[in-house]
Image (cartoon, rainbow, N blue to C red):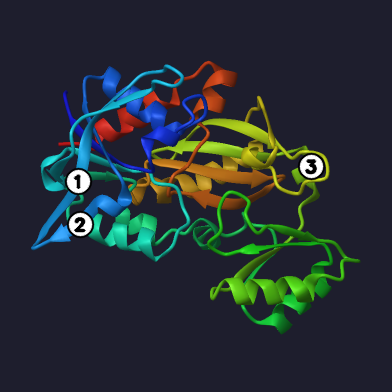
Amino acid sequence: MSLKVAIQMDPIESVNINADSTFMLAMEAQRRGHALYHYLPRKLSFKEGRVIARGRALQVRRELGNHFTLGAEEVLDLSQVDVVLMRQDPPFDMAYITATHVLEHIHPKTLVVNDPAHVRNAPEKLFVTHFEGVMPPTLISADVEAIREFRAEHQDIIIKPLYGNGGAGVFHVRPDDENLGALLEMFTTTWREPVIVQRYVPEVRKGDKRIILVDGKAAGAVNRVPAAGEARSNMHVGGRPEKTTLTKREQEICEIIGPALKERGLIFVGIDVIGDYLTEINVTSPTGIQEINRFDGSALEQLVWDAIERRLP
């Protein structure tokens, strides 16, 4: 099977080939003999019933400083390609949402991964709320009084932007912290959306586990341990990756959410688990493939492509 694959992503020049999951998906597609094309999200257009993108043929290789070759720019009719990988990084803003609306015109004749309509309907911190018994105590609100009442009840809390990503804007507010009012003022002037407030889960000091699910099945995991004095475990803010396995509770969480992911065409998903709680379901541009591969000797990109190819006619 030789496929024509278009990758909607950020500039290929800035990719870290030793960490980037999209790079691994491209490498595996190329290994299988698929033809690759790269285009930037801003090059995607809807024109008179057609979905087009100004893209370039792409070749990739694991060679630092020389990891890609791009061909001449050409107009791609995305209805004529087999697969579109929607892999640009968040934020999950109106530009991102608009791209899902545009790509919905070609899916599923052209298989878009992940399904654009369900990506749009599954923001990381909101999708979790549809599954009972998996989240820590949580409030989603712009009501300052409701937030203060939640803080009074739970004392030790985390507050973060509802559509944030990468650990940006995440604050740990301890019981004796006097900065809640100032933080809420900052949030309301920076974002129009509600914030998400959760009871602090102290197990985060032992790590925030990223679990990859492929077509609804747990495929691997990496534990991300926060740096000293840091409440966030994201690796780009100093989190340390560690080898790990799934606990019985984590397997249970995957079994609870897995069927819903598969049904919605959310083929490649990364979830975040702290202690016994699911905190996020990442469906936009999940990462973690390379870290897990290094620790487990696995090849998660192969599992993702196996799942993609199974869904094709």
Q: Is residue 177 left or right of residue 24?
A: right
Residue 41 percent coordinates (x, y) = 31, 51
Identify residue for label 3: 205
- Amino acid at dot 3: Arg
Mark 2 belongs to which amino acid?
Ser
Secondary structure beneath dot 3 equals helix
In the foreground, 265 or 132: 265
Q: Amino acid at mark 1?
A: Arg
Going 63% across and 45% down the picture, which residue do you hit?
Answer: 273
Q: Earlier in the sequence, mark 2 or mark 3?
A: 2
The image quarter in which residue 81 lies: top left
Q: Identify the secondary structure beneath mark 2.
A: strand
Can you identify the residue that label 1 sits on?
54
Residue 294 horizontal/vertical position (percent): 56, 19
- The N terminus appears in which quarter of the rendering? top left
| SS category of the residue bearing label 1 | strand
Q: Which label lies toward us, 3 or 1?
A: 1
- Mark 1 residue crowding within 10 angstroms, few (<14) / some (14–19) / many (20+): some
On the picture, is 242 further left or further right than 22?
Answer: right
Name the quarter where the C terminus is drawn: top left
Dot 2 alpha-carbon crowd within 10 angstroms: few under 14, some 14 to 19, many 20 or more: some
Q: Is residue 139 left or right of residue 11?
A: right
Q: Which residue is at 62% across, 78% downward?
A: 142
What residue is disc 2 on? Answer: 45
* Cβ–Cβ under 8 Å for marks 2 and 3: no
